[in-house]
Amino acid sequence: MIMWRQPRPNEANFLPWFQQLLLAQRRQRYTMLALGLIVSLLLLASVGWQYAGWRQAVSQTHDVLHAGHLYLHQQQQNTWLTMRETQQAQRNASVTQGLQHKAWLPALELATLVTKLSDAQQLTRWRWTQLKGQAGRVEFELSRMQAWQPWWQTWIQARPNSKVLALNAQPHGIGLRVQYQVIHDSVAAMPNQTLDSLALRPDPMKHNLAAVAAENMVQQLSHLSSSVELSAAQDSLQLTAQLPVSQWRALAPVPNGVGWTLTELSLVSASSGLWDLAMSWQADPLGPDLGDHNRPLSLAQQWAIGLAFDQFSGPFKQLENVTTKSIVPQPTWRFAGYSQQANKGALVWLRQVANGTVKRLKLGQAVGPWRLIGANAQQVTLQQGKQQWVLQRQCVTGVCP
């Protein structure tokens, strides 16, 4: 059976419209959601594309920097390889100059003291010591000093860091013991403002000088005295000898070599008038800081050191009240010839009486124990310590017979 229901007026008029409204709103929401998703995807795609471009630019920049680094490194290595030999020679020369400077320092300090002494003062002991990695230290003793204060004021002007260790009374005056540390100015190596100054710098240049064997060091000591006693170990070398004042020049410069460091040099006055010499070297492993960029002493400084040693009379003899006459040397040499050229030093020819041997000398050179200190066309003057020997020329022109 079929039954029909009659709707009310509101239901018949508004129900289809409401359902249609709900359906339209649902479609609008779906459309907005789809549009939001599409916009989000587009934004994500844009950000991703920009990020990919940024990463690619960073990667390209890194590649360019790495390529530049490799190029600079290659150029640096090529430059250093082409200049390696020159730089190595400069480094070795610096090391050699440092060794020469250290070898002349003890003689320089001793000569400085000798030039400050007067005739009434007596040097009884002088000692140089140097520990590894430290500056040299000098200690000396003086005696027979009547008025030591003026001398001390003069001395501290030359060595301001000196200090008095002992001051005692002696029968003939005052005894003074002094110590000071050797301070010398070093010359810093200026950098070369060329292609060597690139930021990518290879390892520092090191010297390749071979260490001097102990046998070669011994050969350098054979000229000091006829009474040299040597004792050599694996890592040390000691020397003792008796040295007259006339042979002090042999101490300038002190024998040295790569791999050896002078640790002690002492001179002690003996009653015989000689000096007891003691020297000690220590084997020093080669290091990169061997060259200290010190300039070696000039020829004028070396000449002044030798002249100071020549003028030093040495220790007093035991019999001071006995008047000694100057020793007149035997006529073993004759004044044979003289030459003087413009802008050059004088040349002197001496002929030996015994065998007729002719020897040519310049000012400052020695023949036996005598040193040439003056020359002209008529005579030459030789000196040994405080003694002088004048040789007269026997002929006027040409070479004397």
Image (cartoon, helix red, strand yellow):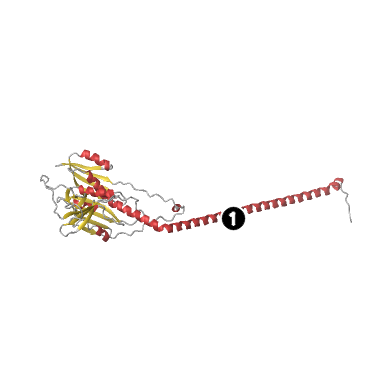
> Which residue carries the number 1 mark?
56
Relative height, residue 13 to residue 91 (above, below): above
User: Residue 113 location in percent, x, y?
Assistant: 23, 45
**Residue sticking out furthest to the front:** 397
Does residue 310 appear in the picture of this structure? yes
Quadrant holding the N terminus:
bottom right
Considering the numbered disc 1 on the image, is that residue within a helix, a strand or a loop? Answer: helix
Q: In this view, does 373 lie to the left or right of 43?
A: left
Q: Where is residue 368 in the image (x, y as percent from the top left)?
A: 19, 55
Q: Which residue is drawn at 50% across and 57% down?
A: 71
Q: Can the viewer see residue 290 in this picture? A: no
Residue type pointed to by label 1? Gln
Question: Which residue is at the front of the view, 195 or 20?
Answer: 195
Q: Observer-nearest residue: 349 or 368?
A: 349
- Left or right: where 82 falls relative to 301: right
Residue 171, above or below 81: above
Where is residue 196? Give x, y as percent.
Answer: 44, 53
388 or 314: which is nearer to us?
Answer: 388
Where residue 46 appears, x then y in whole percent?
65, 52
Quadrant the C terminus occupies: bottom left
Residue pictured at 51% horizontal, 55% vertical: 68
